[in-house]
Image (tube, rainbow, N blue to C red):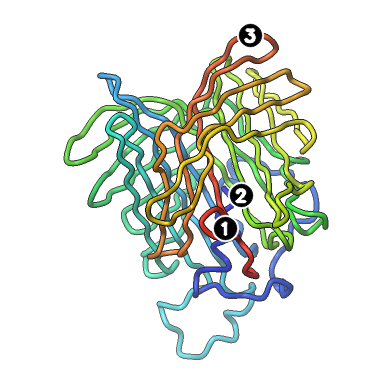
Amino acid sequence: MFLFLILMSTCAAVKVIAEDEAGYLSVTGPCNLTFPEDHGPHAGYRTEWWYYTGNLQTESGARFGYQLTFFRSQISPSGAEKKWPRPASAWRTQQIYIGHAAVSDISGKRHFQAEQVARGALGLAGTSEAAGDTTIFINNWRAQIRTDAHILKVVTDEFSYQLALKPVKQPVLHGQAGYSRKGATPRRASCYYSVTRLISDGALTVGGKTMKVAGLTWMDHEFSTAPLEPGIVGWDWFSLQLSDRTEIMLYQFRNEKGGLSPASSGTFIDSFGNSRHLTKDDFRIDVVDQWKSPRSKALYPTHWQLTIFPLSIQLNVDANLSDQEMQTSASTGVTYWEGSVSASGSAAKNSVSGTGYVELTGYAQPFSAPM
């Protein structure tokens, strides 16, 4: 979910100076998001993304994970277009869109990925809003957010999927009314919400074989202008959907000395959709096992013990497939791990199980470049 922070420092089209935020909007306090309006784009903020991850199963029991992320990156402040040279060109735009998609064939022990980059011009990529619906697209990839469902479509040479996602709960605002702190100063923050449980069904094609699938999806939407705190080398992000109809989101920022940033936090969502903010001191994530990538040589955690102290939650979280590394040389140039996981353990002394996704950054190389 935090890939926008790397995106801004690695994509040549969006090189900026970290301290120079003049002309961009800043997140400095409660976002008070409303829906369906805030499903749409937020021009004026430097970076924004819509992010889907889910776990699916075929009628025969074959298991798959999937990811779809759309990034919007504004490359100049609002109003800069008034100074563009004349005559106008249809290619000119302030918005660049990047897409990452992946499928984890858990039963077949294979991981597939694809990426796209396009200008927000000439119908190549962008967003549209009509009658309360929002559509985000890059070429033949799209996500349509309707009042009753989210519709996803991805077509690549190696895989494709078309899914209908029906939300079970209302959007959850993280932090303080959606104001999610990412550092010590008020401006190091984002507006951040999630739709934490979407019943999913549709069709998935891998290796030329099309299968009916069903399962659960998690959706994030976040926008910001601020850079990461200096000294942060990466982060670990967890989204878990448990059998008692609760959900957990946690993220921890790792610093260059091996410690964790005080800005690390999370959210617990109960079975009714009520949320509880979690601070860094409310939880602990211990690494139990690791996997070394044969390509990047990065050593990634793949098995964790997760404890949430005030809720008496103890979980073992395991990668469903060790190799779920994303290498995005054709878009952001970032190498990261984005993978399907399973969870088991207890919550308030009751046994629970579940599925989810984990994102790991800064393991192939530390995040140290300015945004």
- Circle number at residue 222: 2
Determine the secondary structure under disc 3: strand
Residue at the extreme right of the image, as rendered: 185
- Circle number at residue 350: 3
260 relative to 316, above or below: below
* Mark 1 and mark 3 residues within 8 Å of each other at the beta carbon: no
Residue 288's spot in the image, x, y percent?
Answer: 57, 32
Of callouts 3 and 2, the N-terminal one: 2
Q: Is residue 16 left or right of residue 51?
A: right
Of callouts 1 and 2, the N-terminal one: 1
Does residue 230 appear in this view?
A: yes
* Callout 1 crowding tier (Cα within 10 Å): few <14, some 14–19, many ≥20: many
Of callouts 1 and 3, the N-terminal one: 1
* Mark 1 and mark 2 residues within 8 Å of each other at the beta carbon: yes
Q: Is residue 201 left or right of residue 286?
A: left
Residue at the extreme left of the image, as rendered: 208
Residue marked by disc 1: 4
> Mark 2: which amino acid?
Glu
